[in-house]
Image: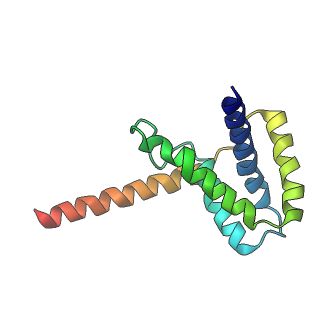
């Protein structure tokens, strides 16, 4: 039972910090490196499409369980304390008021572009072998 409570707390914190990054992007005090990483993380985290589709056994949840939380943690560590102190309450207020996260159509387009590029690369490599 304790493990379930810990996992729920961790999931809520990851969701909050992902949204915190969304607010940190709009804060002029965010350093450029944190802003660039936050931009990529937020675009992917808020995208309705996963990089690795969830229907693929084991790998489908790898990005949700390891990659995304790790990138969120790293980006939050790069943010100044003052930015975190201002953006975390905004994220909590958003979640309390709306109970959902914003969506990133750009993130979806980014994932689709990546899959398209990989498919094109695979197709050209296959054509050269034939």
User: Quadrant location of residue 2?
Assistant: top right
Q: In this rendering, would 74 be left or right of 85?
A: left
Q: In this rendering, would 28 be left or right of 10?
A: right
Residue drawn at the location 84% of the way across and 34% of the way down: 97
- Count of number-bearing discs: 0
User: Quadrant location of residue 77?
Assistant: bottom right
Residue drawn at the location 82% of the way across and 41% of the way down: 94
- Percent across and percent down for residue 43 are 61, 54
Judging depth in this view, the residue of 28 and 13 nearest the camera is 13
Q: In this rendering, would 103 be left or right of 54?
A: right
The C terminus appears in which quarter of the rendering?
bottom left
Image vertical order of residue 86 relative to residue 103, above or below: below
Q: Residue furthest left?
A: 130
- Percent across and percent down for residue 113 are 45, 57
Judging depth in this view, the residue of 48 and 30 nearest the camera is 30
Q: Residue furthest bottom?
A: 32
- Percent across and percent down for residue 99 are 76, 33
Residue drawn at the location 72% of the way across and 74% of the way down: 32
Judging depth in this view, the residue of 69 and 107 nearest the camera is 69
- Percent across and percent down for residue 107 are 57, 53
Image vertical order of residue 1 relative to residue 70, above or below: above
Q: Residue furthest top?
A: 1
User: Does any portion of residue 101 appear in the rendered image?
Assistant: no
Q: How is the image coloured?
A: rainbow
The N terminus appears in which quarter of the rendering?
top right
Residue drawn at the location 62% of the way across and 58% of the way down: 71
User: Does any portion of residue 7 appear in the rendered image?
Assistant: yes
């Amino acid at each position: 039972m304790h493990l379930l409570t810990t996992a729920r707390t961790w999931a809520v914190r990851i969701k909050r910090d992902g949204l915190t990054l969304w607010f940190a992007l709009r804060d002029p005090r965010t350093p450029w490196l944190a802003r660039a990483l936050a931009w990529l993380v937020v675009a992917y985290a808020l995208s309705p499409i996963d990089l690795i589709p969830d229907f693929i056994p084991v790998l489908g949840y790898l990005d949700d369980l390891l990659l995304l939380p790790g990138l969120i943690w790293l980006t939050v560590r790069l943010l100044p304390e003052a930015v975190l102190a201002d953006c975390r309450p905004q994220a909590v207020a958003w979640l309390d008021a709306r109970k959902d996260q914003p969506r990133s159509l750009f993130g979806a387009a980014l994932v689709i572009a990546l899959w398209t590029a990989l498919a094109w690369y695979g197709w050209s490599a296959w054509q050269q072998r034939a």
